[in-house]
Each structure stands twice: as C-alpha cells, then as structure tokens.
Image: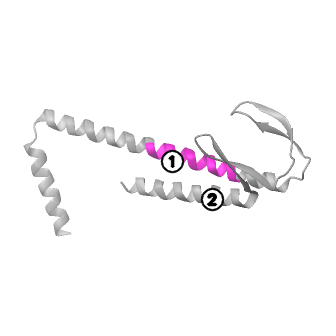
Amino acid sequence: MASSDQGRVAIEEELNKLTVEQVRQVKEQVDGEVGLLQDSLNRIRTAAVRYEMASKALHNLSVHPAGKQMLVPLTASLYVPGTLDDAHKVLIDIGTGYYVEKTMQEGKEYCERKIDFLKANHDKLVEV
C-alpha cells in the first residue's frame, strides 16, 4: 500500500513538471487509447452475440425433422425458401471465406469455445 502511494506521488510530481501543451498531448493520447479499447470491447461483444445466435440456430436445427420447410438466410436481409435435408452435418464459417463441415454437436462445441474465448478477452480488456 505504501508503494502505491509513493507511485501516485511520483506521477503527480511528473505531471506538475509538464507544460499545458504537454498535458493536452497526454490527454489526447489517453483519449485515443481509451477509444481503441472501447472499439475493441464493442467488437468482442458483437462477435460473442453472433456466436450465441449461431449456437441457438444450431439447437433449433437439431430439433427439426428432415424435410422441414424453412427460410435460409443468404444475407442479413435476404432469405430464400429451402428444405432441411440433413441436420446432422453443418458448415461452420471459420473465417476469411473458409468453411468446415462438422457434426451438429461439433458445431455447438465450436460456438461455445468461441464464446468462452471472446468472454475471456472481454474480461481482460475490462481490467485494462
């Protein structure tokens, strides 16, 4: 605890030595770093939500019988009619346009691993 107080005193002494312009520059730099951290947190949250939605979608697919009519998303706003053929195998987007065929259970496990990884990174960033 004493070393923490000494550290604060040393920082205050260093800040008192800075000119007004130097303090402004330090503030701008810190504001920029905080902005980058906020952007990173937002991107991580968005990715985690996407994986949670994918996990729920896999669960919904697993309970539907083969031959079920459904709408298949081509983009975020474009859906086409389709028929569920085999819900035991799914394609997983692993990034940069690459897809891997996995079983339904492996797909769910992949999503859960990604969610756990993103939450751990989110927690590390919040600590910073």
Query: Which quarter of the figure has residue 39?
Result: top left
Q: Which residue is under mark 2?
A: 112
Q: Along the line of sight, which residue is nearer the eye, 51 or 28?
A: 51
Give the residue displayed 58% in from the left and 41% down from the top. Answer: 96
Q: Nearer the viewer, residue 101 or 18?
A: 101
x, y percent for residue 120 = 49, 59
Q: Residue 34 is drawn in which quadrant?
A: top left
Q: Residue furthest bottom?
A: 1
Q: Amino acid at mark 1?
A: Ile
Answer whether residue 42 is magenta in the image. yes
Q: Secondary structure at mark 2?
A: helix
Q: Residues within 10 Å of mark 2 (few under 14, many from 20)?
A: some
Q: Find numbered disc 1 in the image and state the secondary structure of the residue it sits on.
A: helix
Residue that badge 1 annotates? 44
Amino acid on which disc 2 is placed: Glu
Please tell me which residue is depicted at 87% across the width and 47% down the height of the picture.
85
- Residue lying at 42% horizontally and 57% vertically, measured from the top left: 124
